Image (spheres, helix red, strand yellow):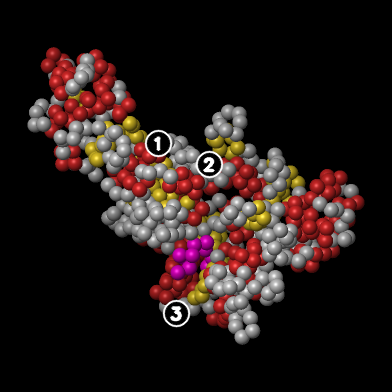
């Protein structure tokens, strides 16, 4: 089936490249999206700009180009990758350079700043920064490069798009979204909108407003001060050049300058409410009068004061635009890219489940009925049992994907090393362990060779993020909870917010599942992924394992032990309630068990689900009971737990203690 899907992917992408309007291609994982992007340059002779958030795909695209032959390919230079100063490999001021970059200055502008502003020793008399050298080389030889490779941010550079088919591989909003304020790795808040707007207004003499509060009041009244300020922006623009003409952008940590200073100020003048506590600035006519791309959108959260600026790329320079995504939300793609897209599916979503099974060999197993958002880092007390059960069923340790705070919580547990694989490369999120958090997993092929994986919790970013994303699309949404109060369980969102919510949770869990087993032989070995959350798309078939701790009732354990003894002690395997009672009491010391207790236990769900019964088949019409013939009984690897085996039958797993004298692995062979 995988060959058929790959062939259909080829046809769909080639057809998309020949369309007049931009196309959104919905293509399943491992269907050859990267290969076919390169193939356009090889066989159809097109100039391609291939944009991806995953750096490993840079190398993959280059490798595909080399295999194909006759393709001149180049990776667009990046200051973080190619500049010694940005990489902190010389005596330059890396932190200052990076802050200027975050404030909106280009890598080239930063290198030509005076050294009193930022020291960049990689660029000086007699020497040229490798980053700038590669940029110059690209400028001179652009027409000779068939395949140009970069990240989504490069779509903002018109010369990279000129005369090319632009391919966006997977959805990535971050390169086009700027948040105010921003938080550093140490938690410091930078680029606070109130301060940026205040500094800009203070620098402009012809505007009769002094701070953000004045702006909002003027917008409400629509008086002379509002009209005067709007007119000023129409005359002077609300662009990066407008900002730099009024305020100098410096790397000083307390400097309130930014390339979006004019845009933020103008946006606050035209914002309109789109939902409770959420405002949106998106007026194409006013934006055009202010020399701003009409597709730009700015959102403000009234409660927190946070602002977001979405700046779609100008794709008019491209010959064609193709967006590739495994599970696209079309409306989000259109807002982020600022254009209408024609949706073309390689296979329908109803077929995806069969493709995962037959094409990729995935076996997806759910371990819980809860969402397990783990947003605060508080993980479930049952996660220990879940991980040890997987460890026992698979007879190996495994890599894990989870939320960052959940991984930090797991790291404090002394039992984690019994379940999660060691990290030999030292490149993972959880020090010493083979792990990735959701934020990084989409840019990684770290687990592509692993046939067993564990995905724990869902990556829900919070109500505010869903509301902000909906507002960027001009929609209002509210969380739906089972009861009053924010502490009650979340059931979903109203309106378009539900589709965004599922993209940010179910869709990301699905993408995490697909990080495992990418190179497995789908004709033979399968990939087993255990999912510790309910957030899996509804069209994905999963099996379920419910884990029971049998040690909370020792009398039930006595019954299981005796049934196991009866089956493998070369005696009569079928037992009545009477014979079970006698045999159990013969070996118990200091306690006894009654026939009534056994009768009740055998009718309990925990025992009846895992025993074989012949009704009225014994002497005098008594029922006969036997250890289940089709089951898996495996050693339980938790060294500190009282239970020491896992009994697996169907979709149930029971943590139990069985006699040490019984050679369980040989007596009860594992059933595959």
Q: 10 Å neighbourhood of mark 3: few (<14), some, or many (≥20)?
A: few
What is the x, y in percent for residue 638? Answer: 31, 40
Q: Which residue is mark 2?
A: 376
Quadrant hosting residue 114: bottom right
What is the x, y in percent for residue 371? Answer: 48, 39
Q: CA distance from mark 1 to mark 3?
A: 56 Å
The answer to which of marks 2 and 1 sits earlier in the sequence is 2
Q: CA distance from mark 2 to mark 3?
A: 52 Å
Is the residue under label 1 in contact with that under label 2 (CB below 8 Å)?
A: no
Query: Which residue is at a point 62% across and 69% down the rendered structure image?
Result: 93
Examine the structure image and report whether residue 105 is included in the region drawn in magenta: no
User: Which quadrant of the rendered structure holds the N terminus?
Assistant: bottom left
Is the residue under label 3 in contact with that under label 2 (CB below 8 Å)?
A: no
Q: Which residue is mark 3?
A: 70
Q: Which residue is mark 1?
A: 382
Q: Which mark is residue 9?
A: none
The range drawn in magenta is 49-59
């Amino acid at each position: 089936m995988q060959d058929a899907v790959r062939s259909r992917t080829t046809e769909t992408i080639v057809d998309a490249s020949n369309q007049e309007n931009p196309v959104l291609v919905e293509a399943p994982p491992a269907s050859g999206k990267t290969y076919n992007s390169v193939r356009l340059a090889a066989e159809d002779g097109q100039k391609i700009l291939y944009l991806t958030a995953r750096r490993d795909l840079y190398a993959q695209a280059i490798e595909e180009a080399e295999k194909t032959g006759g393709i001149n390919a180049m990776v667009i230079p990046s200051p973080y990758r190619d500049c010694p100063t940005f990489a902190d490999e010389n005596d330059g001021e890396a932190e200052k350079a990076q802050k200027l970059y975050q404030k909106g200055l280009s890598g080239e502008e930063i290198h030509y700043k005076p050294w009193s502003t930022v020291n960049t020793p990689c660029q000086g008399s007699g020497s040229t920064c490798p980053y700038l050298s590669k940029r110059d080389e690209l400028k001179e030889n652009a027409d000779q490069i068939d395949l140009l490779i970069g990240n989504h941010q490069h779509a903002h550079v018109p010369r990279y798009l000129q005369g090319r088919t632009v391919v966006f591989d997977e959805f990535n909003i971050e390169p086009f979204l700027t948040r105010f304020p921003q938080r550093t790795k140490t938690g410091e808040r930078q680029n606070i909108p109130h301060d940026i707007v205040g500094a800009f207004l203070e620098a402009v003499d012809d505007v009769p407003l002094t701070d953000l509060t004045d702006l909002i009041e003027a917008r409400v009244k629509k008086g002379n001060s509002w009209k005067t300020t709007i007119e000023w922006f129409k005359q002077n623009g609300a662009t990066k050049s407008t900002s730099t003409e009024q305020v100098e952008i410096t790397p000083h940590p307390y400097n309130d300058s930014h390339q979006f200073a004019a845009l933020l100020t103008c946006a606050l003048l035209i914002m309109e409410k789109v939902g409770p506590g959420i405002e949106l600035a998106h007026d194409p006519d006013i934006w055009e009068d202010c020399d701003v791309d009409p597709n730009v959108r700015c959102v403000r959260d009234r409660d927190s004061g946070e602002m977001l600026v979405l700046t779609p790329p100008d794709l008019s320079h491209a010959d064609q635009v193709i967006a590739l995504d495994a599970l696209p939300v079309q409306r989000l793609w259109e807002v982020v890219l600022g254009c209408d897209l024609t949706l073309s599916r390689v296979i329908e979503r109803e077929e995806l489940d069969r493709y995962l099974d037959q094409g990729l060999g995935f076996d997806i197993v759910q371990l819980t009925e809860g969402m397990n958002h783990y947003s605060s880092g508080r993980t479930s007390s049952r996660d220990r049992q879940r991980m040890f059960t997987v460890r026992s069923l698979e007879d190996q340790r495994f890599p894990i994907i989870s939320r960052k705070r959940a991984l930090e919580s797991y790291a404090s547990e002394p039992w984690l090393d019994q379940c999660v694989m060691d990290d030999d490369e030292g490149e993972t999120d959880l020090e010493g362990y083979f792990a990735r958090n959701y934020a990084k997993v989409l840019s990684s092929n770290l687990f592509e060779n692993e046939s067993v994986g564990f995905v724990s919790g869902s990556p829900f970013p919070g109500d505010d993020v869903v509301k902000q994303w909906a507002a960027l699309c001009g929609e209002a949404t509210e969380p739906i909870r089972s009861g009053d109060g924010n502490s009650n369980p979340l059931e979903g969102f109203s309106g378009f917010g539900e589709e965004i919510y599922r993209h940010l949770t179910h869709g990301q869990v699905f993408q995490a599942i697909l990080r495992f087993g990418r190179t497995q032989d789908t004709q033979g070995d399968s990939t087993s992924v255990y999912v510790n959350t309910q957030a899996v798309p509804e069209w994905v078939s999963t099996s379920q394992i419910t884990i029971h701790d049998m040690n909370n009732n020792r009398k039930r354990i006595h019954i299981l032990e005796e049934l196991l003894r009866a089956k493998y002690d070369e005696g009569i395997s079928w037992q009545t309630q009477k014979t079970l009672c006698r045999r159990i009491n013969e070996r118990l010391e200091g306690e006894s068990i009654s026939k009534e207790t056994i009768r009740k236990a055998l009718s309990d769900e925990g025992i009846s689900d895992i025993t074989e019964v012949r009704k009225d088949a014994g002497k005098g019409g008594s029922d006969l009971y036997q250890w289940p013939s089709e089951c898996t009984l495996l050693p339980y690897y938790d060294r500190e737990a009282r239970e020491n085996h896992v009994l697996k039958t169907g979709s149930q797993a029971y943590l139990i203690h069985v006699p040490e004298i019984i050679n369980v692995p040989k007596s009860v062979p594992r059933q595959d």
